[in-house]
Amino acid sequence: MKFKLSICALLFLTVFGCKPNNSEENQYGETVKSNTTKAAVVLNMEGETHTMQLEAINPQKKLDFDKDDLQYVIYTNESKVSINFNLKGSNVLKSVPMTYTIPDANEGAIVIDLSFFNKDRNVEKRSNKRIVFRSGTITISKLTKNSLIMNFEGKGNGMIERGETLFPISGSINITY
């Protein structure tokens, strides 16, 4: 009888007691949710995690590979956040995978631009609902006419916010369309 009780207790602990840790610490010491949902887009920003499932994404894209001018707007009808990502004159197609360090990559002409629009962000000026990725790294693992896989980690703030208002931003995009 003790043996059966021990087996039942062990099974109970195994099934209910070992929950996976769905968070991790970023390079800034903040706890962020891990991508355990297998979402196509995960964005950690201002203490919130925003996700987008591939089937819900309404990507707008203007991809001119011949002129090396790529523009993405990634959003869903339900999401309060959209992502804008632009590459111009980057030669990334010849160099994938490629890591860019911001702001160094944009000395002179702007080559890479990453920003977000949070329609529910509580700010005095509407222009600060647009959040600019000001420093950090952007790594593009795959870029084709039908897919974009990239990760980013750094800091940003509202479009016209300056100074010490920078906050951590991290995330990943893995879309196929």
Image (cartoon, rainbow, N blue to C red):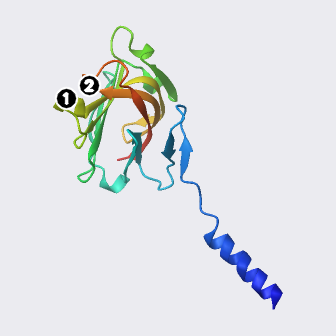
The answer to whether residue 45 is seen in the rendering is yes
Question: Which amino acid type is shown beneath numbered disc 2?
Answer: Met
| Tag 2 secondary structure | loop
Q: Where is residue 158 in the image (x, y as percent from the top left)?
A: 28, 28
Q: Distance between the residues labelled 1 and 2?
A: 6 Å
Q: In the rendered picture of this protein, how many numbered marks are placed on residues?
A: 2
Would you identify the image quadrant in which residue 162 lies? Answer: top left
Query: Residue at the location (37% across, 38% down)?
Result: 46
Residue 12 percent coordinates (x, y): 66, 76
Q: Is residue 157 left or right of residue 8?
A: left
Nearer to me, 57 or 65? 57
Position of 22 with respect to 168 (left or right) is right
Asked if marks 1 and 2 touch (Cβ < 8 Å), the reply is yes
Q: Which of marks 1 and 2 is nearer the N terminus?
A: 1
Nearer the observer, 90 or 160: 160
Name the mark on residue 159: 2
- Residue 64 in view: no
Q: Which residue lies furthest to the top in this view?
A: 108
Q: In the picture, which quadrant includes the N terminus?
A: bottom right
- Sort mark 2 into few (<14), some (14-19) or many (20+) by Cα contacts within 10 Å: some
Callout 1 environment at 10 Å: few (<14), some (14 to 19), or many (20+)?
few
Q: What residue type is labelled 1?
A: Ser
Residue 165 to residue 26: above or below = above
The residue drawn where x is 33% and y is 16% is: 110
Task: Identify the residue position indicated by label 1 in the image.
Answer: 127
Left or right of residue 140: residue 124: left
Residue nearest the observer in this picture, 130 or 109: 130
- Residue 77 x %, y %: 23, 52
Above or below, 137 against 171 in this view is above
Q: Position of residue 142 (x, y in %)?
A: 47, 36
Above or below, 81 against 93 in this view is: below
